[in-house]
Image (tube, rainbow, N blue to C red):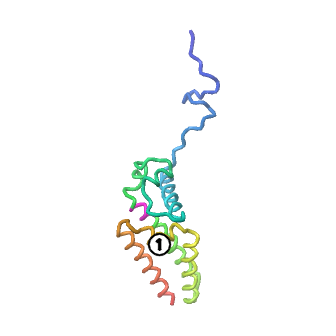
Amino acid sequence: MLHAMKPASMSPATAMPRDAAPRKRPKPGERREQILQCLAGMLEEPGAERITTAALAQRLQVSEAALYRHFASKAQMFEALIEFIERSMFGMINQIVQAQESGLVQASRIVQALLGFAEKNAGLCRVMAGDALVGEHARLQVRMNQFFERVEAALRQSL
């Protein structure tokens, strides 16, 4: 009886060449993170105007539909960036308040943390300043305003 033989370089389970790397799918949540990192990166570029989902998808080499599997809208992408800003900044503010007894030192360190965060994250700084939110959903600017009101309250409480 004759059996069809596969070449030695083929994997029996997949019939793919062993040296060919299979298409790697991102782990759950990983693609979402990639989208947000790419969006923040695009916001860092000099002269970056309003970013479209088409441009974002092209940069990621995915379809726009792939973006919408992770976010219902571009506004939700910006909301996720704002959530990251809030978690990062208020995490730092809480650490500063717990570590420092002097209110004046607390206030100084909070301002330093805010400015340092903005300096290290130029794209997110544009979100914080509202520049990247022009032409987007109004609730995004409201949310950033609330963020700064909370920072101001933390500063007042320190002093």
Query: What amino acid does circle 1 point to?
Result: Met
Give the secondary structure at mark 1. Answer: helix
Residue depicted at x 63% and y 34%: 19
Task: Where is residue 38? Give x, y as percent.
Answer: 51, 57
Task: Where is residue 114? Give x, y as percent.
Answer: 54, 77
Residue occupying the far left of the picture: 138
Between 49 and 112, the one lying in front of the other is 49
For label 1, the crowd category at 10 Å Cα-Cα, with few meaning under 14, some 14 to 19 and many 20 or more, is many
Residue depicted at x 46% and y 65%: 81
Tell me the quarter of the image containing the N terminus.
top right
Look at the picture and state if 101 lies above or below 147: below
Residue occupying the far top of the picture: 1
Which residue corresponds to mark 1?
128
Look at the picture and state if 108 lies above or below 23: below
Task: Where is residue 64? Give x, y as percent.
Answer: 41, 50
Between 128 and 103, the one lying in front of the other is 128
Q: How many numbered marks are there? A: 1
| Image side of residue 75 versus residue 6, left or right | left
Q: Which residues are magenta?
A: 75-80
Main structural element of the magenta stretch: helix, strand or loop?
A: helix
Residue depicted at x 54% and y 63%: 45
Residue 50: quadrant of the picture: bottom left
| Image side of residue 89 versus residue 64, left or right | right
Report if residue 152 lies within the magenta region. no
Look at the picture and state if 113 lies above or below 25: below
| Image side of residue 83 versus residue 6, left or right | left
Task: Where is residue 48? Give x, y as percent.
Answer: 49, 63
